[in-house]
Amino acid sequence: MTFYIYDSFSREKKKFEPINSDDVRIYACGPTVYNYAHIGNARMSVVTDLLVRVLKTIYKNVKFVSNITDIDDKIIEASKVSGKKIQDITEKFHKSYNSDMKNLGVNKPDLQPKATEHIKEMIEMIESLIKKNVAYIENKHVLFNVQKYKYYGKLSRRTREEQIAGSRVEVASYKKNPEDFILWKPSKDNEPSWSSPWGEGRPGWHIECSAMSKKCLNFPFDIHCGGIDLTFPHHENEIAQSCSLIGSDCKPDNFSKYWFHNGFVTVSGEKMSKSLGNIKLVNDILKKYSGNVIRLSLLSSHYRQPMDWSEKILEQSKKTLIRFHKALSEYDIRKNEQNLMKNENMLDFLKALYDDLNTPKALAILNGWFDKLKKKDLPNGLLIQQIIKALNILGLNLEEIKISENLIDENKKKEIEKMIEDRRIARQKKDFKKADEIREKLKKMNILIDDTSDGTKWTSNDK
Ligand SMILES: [Zn+2]
């Protein structure tokens, strides 16, 4: 079977042909750890995890590296605002990120290198770039001269004017070209700093991914992943500095053979932002929904499409999982998996995923299997095995689906709250007959209610 990948560099769907099929290597730009992970971080993590899982059904050895940015302006700012030490902030949010992603069924990357542990590699890389005459020193800053890399702008397909408009204008007076970017800069008072040939300072953001991907995977590797918002300038800069180590006429595929970008996540059509107060944090959503529900929601649309996050998607996924739960509860799902890789139905499912991770299609096939299970259309043993295999590839936690009574509890809770609200309205309209009927119905459900000045409280008499 062949995997087809949409390569966002060439903007074409291509047959995936790894550089070495015995050693497939993937890199993804990981989070900057200064806050809890939001649903946009989670989308990148979940779809990249799925990519790795799907490639592992074809290739024996798939190595996946995703970094942790633990030095950055935003982290320094968070430390200033909170009065907490930088290291305390980054350790706390690195841990919470991994724990949230684990809840979403994301396997930990094979390597998760931290920027602050690779300063030496970054300095060496910057020194080589200066020697190659593609980077220059200006007032204790080291900058990359984008005019020296002939393929600059080829990934994002931006014109020079668009590049200038899109690059952050920082220390502009030192720059030979406005779009030149910083490789190294002096640290201000009390900011973390490291010794370098250019004085005490710290790296710019972009260089860390080149240094860490080179160290962990070597160039070229197979797939570079990240959110679509990183295309420019971050990924453009990664290509320029990585390829320039070889030579200014070195083509971008000498860094990464394919580029894999996932779409944006918006909330009610708006970009998530602090000022709008609409940032959806994974650990908040986890208080109400299981990791499976969030994961299924993120996989319900194709990874390249923009996704408008809403409670509706979560509720829909919850319903689907309750349906899965009910269907599976009759069966023993711990049975050994048969080899299904040649099973025709299974191939149909895999074919959808091998087609650039077409999860909507794969999920439709899986849903169809659950319909068949209900109608008892196929020998159930085989069908159950197919379902287990498919859920495993999608990274949905079977045990959690099996013991997901809490999902049903959530539904029951909603039903109770709706009844209490209906009773309140009935009382307001002085329809006491209806209000009493609702109270009796609740009583039969073992729910006791208490009308307080703060509204109606309820308790379950079940436990
Ligand atoms: Zn990166």
Image (cartoon, rainbow, N blue to C red):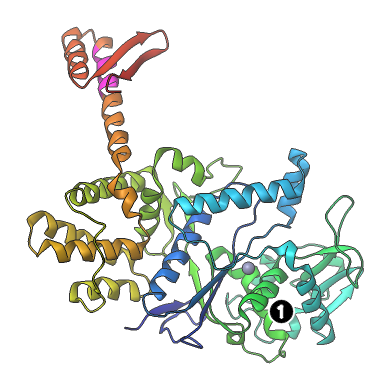
Nearer to me, 419 or 94:
94
Highlighted magenta segment, given as a residue range = 419-426
The residue lying at 23 percent from left, 62 percent from top is 387
So how many labels did they put on this image? 1
* Position in image of residue 365 (x %, y %): 22, 65
Is 140 placed left or right of 104 in the picture? right
Q: Is residue 34 magenta?
A: no
The answer to whether residue 298 is above or below residue 420 is: below
Q: Quadrant of ligand 1?
A: bottom right
Q: Mark 1 = which residue?
A: 241
Q: Is residue 237 visible?
A: no
Specify the amino acid type for callout 1.
Answer: Gln
The residue lying at 65 percent from left, 69 percent from top is 234
Element at label 1: helix
The residue lying at 47 percent from left, 85 percent from top is 22
**Magenta stretch: dominant secondary structure:** helix
* Position in image of residue 278 (x %, y %): 52, 42
